[in-house]
Image (cartoon, helix red, strand yellow):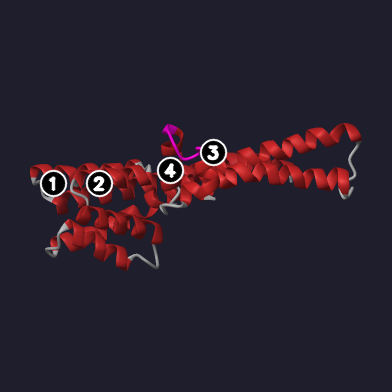
């Protein structure tokens, strides 16, 4: 896959950087994720096109009129172009919503660790171990951030990377609080506690909003049935 991508120059330029950013936001942080993605995006349209040609013209498993064979085959090729983008976009959206949902509990654990005297690096590691089973997405983010805080020369860059990977306003607010603590020495435990309360209230308000929409959504099915 890498040979094909390198030969066709698929992993160079701003488009490649944007692809890597989308994959990180979807949770694919492996260095080979971009290679696999561009290879699938290149091969899937061809594969679907050949499969549809075989089903319609060679084997006649799909008995279509002659004037519909070409549009169906072209539609399969176009679907192959669109499917990887749609899949990554949906995965990233679901991951962002899940991170926003579980973040208050993660902040509560972070607050406990910070009040117990742990540094932010050690607190991230400890919380990631505790959340491996119940909240693996947030645990993975905290673990990656702890590693980058330890090894990157610029700690601010590690925090910015977490905000970029999550693409979440809640995580961005957490990053701003951590950056202020790193820069100005503000008390971290109180900031985490306030953020946790705000995010929990936001989560509750969204649930109430969904509940308030239910009568309107149920009106039409009740009338139909």
**3D distance between C-alphas at marks 2 and 4:** 18 Å
Residue identified by numbered label 2: 159
- Image check: 83 left or right of 117? right
| Numbered disc in front, either 3 or 1 | 3
| Numbered disc in front, either 1 or 4 | 4
State whether the magenta stretch is mostly helix, strand or loop. Answer: loop
Image quadrant in which you'd find residue 167: top left
Residue name at image x 40 percent, y 61 percent:
136
Residue identified by numbered label 4: 20
Residue 203 visible within the image:
yes
Give the crowd class for mark 1: few <14, some 14-19, many >=20 residues within 10 Å. Answer: some
Residue name at image x 27 percent, y 50 percent:
197
> Are the two marked residues, 2 and 1, in contact with CB atoms closer than 8 angstroms?
yes
Callout 3: SS: loop
> Are the two marked residues, 3 and 2, in contact with CB atoms closer than 8 angstroms?
no
**3D distance between C-alphas at marks 3 and 1:** 44 Å
> Are the two marked residues, 3 and 4, in contact with CB atoms closer than 8 angstroms?
no
Image coordinates for residue 19, horizontal then vertical, percent? 46, 40
| Numbered disc in front, either 3 or 2 | 3
Callout 2: SS: helix
Residue identified by numbered label 3: 8
Q: In this view, does 219 lie above or below 188?
A: above
Give the crowd class for mark 3: few <14, some 14-19, many >=20 residues within 10 Å. Answer: few
**3D distance between C-alphas at marks 1 and 4:** 28 Å
Question: Which stretch did the figure color magenta?
Answer: 9-14
């Amino acid at each position: 896959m890498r040979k094909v991508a390198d030969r066709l120059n698929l992993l160079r330029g701003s488009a490649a950087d944007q692809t890597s950013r989308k994959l990180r936001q979807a949770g694919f942080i492996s260095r080979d994720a971009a290679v696999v993605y561009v290879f699938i995006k290149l091969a899937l349209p061809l594969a679907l096109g050949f499969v549809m040609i075989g089903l319609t013209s060679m084997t006649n498993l799909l008995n279509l009129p002659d004037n519909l064979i070409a549009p169906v085959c072209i539609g399969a090729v176009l679907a192959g172009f669109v499917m990887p983008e749609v899949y990554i976009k949906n995965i990233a959206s679901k991951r962002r919503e899940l991170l926003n949902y579980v973040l208050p509990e993660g902040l509560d654990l972070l607050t406990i660790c910070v009040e117990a005297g742990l540094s932010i690096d050690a607190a991230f590691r400890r919380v990631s171990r505790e959340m491996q089973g119940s909240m693996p997405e947030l645990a993975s983010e905290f673990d990656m951030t702890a590693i980058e805080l330890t090894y990157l020369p610029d700690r601010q860059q590690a925090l910015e990377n977490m905000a970029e990977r999550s693409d979440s306003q809640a995580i961005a607010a957490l990053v701003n609080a951590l950056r202020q603590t790193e820069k100005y020495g503000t008390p971290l435990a109180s900031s985490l506690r306030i953020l946790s309360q705000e995010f929990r209230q936001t989560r509750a308000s969204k649930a109430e909003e969904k509940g308030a929409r239910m009568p309107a959504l149920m009106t039409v099915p009740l009338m139909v049935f």
